[in-house]
Image: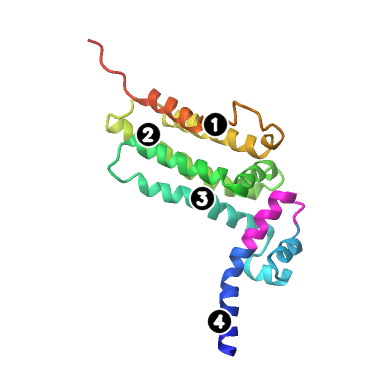
């Protein structure tokens, strides 16, 4: 009996970082970063404030861990896809789809909104976001575009222009969904179910080289 209790405690201890991150994400989205207190996060996770600080030194560290896990890791996963033999169009679509899904999943999109609204009050957060999410995303998309140009799959273009054309609309849709969307459910422009695919098609068609004139 005692061995089972010890095993259960070990499993519970191993799960605590996940429980703390889930609780922090819920409260950050509900209350905002500044208003969410460490003791409230600990209580939501069912532990003491002292226990929270055994795993995370501050709210900032909790938020950075959430950003790294819920968003930055999706970019790392996508990075491996840029080395396979598939057409560059397929790679670009897969990477952007993975990133869009990460932003649209439940509270993760709210986390993205939170970063944008709180960054001016927490400069270290803005730096972490830029270094861990934005720059890796920009480099990955640029690398795929350059790959497509080198292989003759894309016409010569400025890779950063493609990044802007793909990433910025995704950002706007995410912010709309988590800020204005709940109060404007009938917005046919922003809530179109095929919006992402149509925008991807438009950008990819613009990248395809024009056939030579006869």
Q: CA distance from mark 1 to mark 2?
A: 18 Å
Q: Quadrant of the N terminus?
A: bottom right
Q: Which residue is mark 1?
A: 169
Please report whichever mark, 4 or 2, sits nearer to the chain's N-terminal start.
4
> Is-magenta flag for residue 29?
yes
Q: Disc 3 vs disc 4: Cβ atoms closer than 8 Å?
A: no
Q: Residue at x 63, y 37 (%)?
A: 177
Q: Disc 1 vs disc 3: Cβ atoms closer than 8 Å?
A: no
Please report whichever mark, 1 or 2, sits nearer to the chain's N-terminal start.
2
For residue 72, the mark is: 3
State the SS at label 4: helix
Highlighted range, magenta: 20-36
For residue 7, the mark is: 4
Q: CA distance from mark 1 to mark 4?
A: 48 Å
Q: Quadrant of the C terminus?
A: top left
Q: Residue 12 lies in what quarter of the image? A: bottom right
Q: Is residue 15 above or below residue 186?
A: below
Q: CA distance from mark 3 to mark 4?
A: 33 Å
Q: CA distance from mark 2 to mark 3?
A: 20 Å
State the SS at label 2: helix
> Is-magenta flag for residue 105?
no
């Amino acid at each position: 009996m005692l061995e089972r209790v010890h095993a259960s405690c070990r499993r519970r201890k191993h799960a605590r970082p996940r429980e703390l991150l889930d609780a922090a994400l819920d409260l950050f989205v509900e209350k905002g970063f500044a208003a969410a207190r460490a003791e409230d996060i600990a209580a939501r996770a069912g532990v003491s404030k002292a226990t929270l600080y055994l795993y995370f030194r501050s709210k900032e560290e909790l938020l950075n861990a959430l950003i790294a896990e819920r968003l930055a890791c999706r970019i790392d996963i996508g990075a491996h896809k840029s080395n396979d033999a598939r057409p560059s169009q397929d790679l670009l679509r897969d990477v952007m789809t993975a990133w869009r899904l990460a932003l649209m999943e439940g509270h993760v999109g709210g986390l993205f909104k939170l970063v944008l609204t709180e960054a001016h009050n927490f400069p270290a957060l803005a730096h972490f976001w830029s270094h861990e999410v934005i720059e890796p995303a920009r480099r990955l998309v640029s690398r795929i575009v350059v790959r497509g140009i080198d292989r003759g799959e894309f016409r010569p273009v400025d890779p950063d222009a493609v990044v802007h054309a793909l990433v910025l609309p995704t950002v706007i849709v995410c912010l709309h969904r988590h800020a204005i969307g709940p109060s404007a459910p009938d917005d046919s422009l922003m809530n179109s179910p095929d919006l992402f695919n149509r925008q991807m098609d438009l950008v990819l068609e613009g990248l395809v080289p024009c056939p030579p004139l006869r």
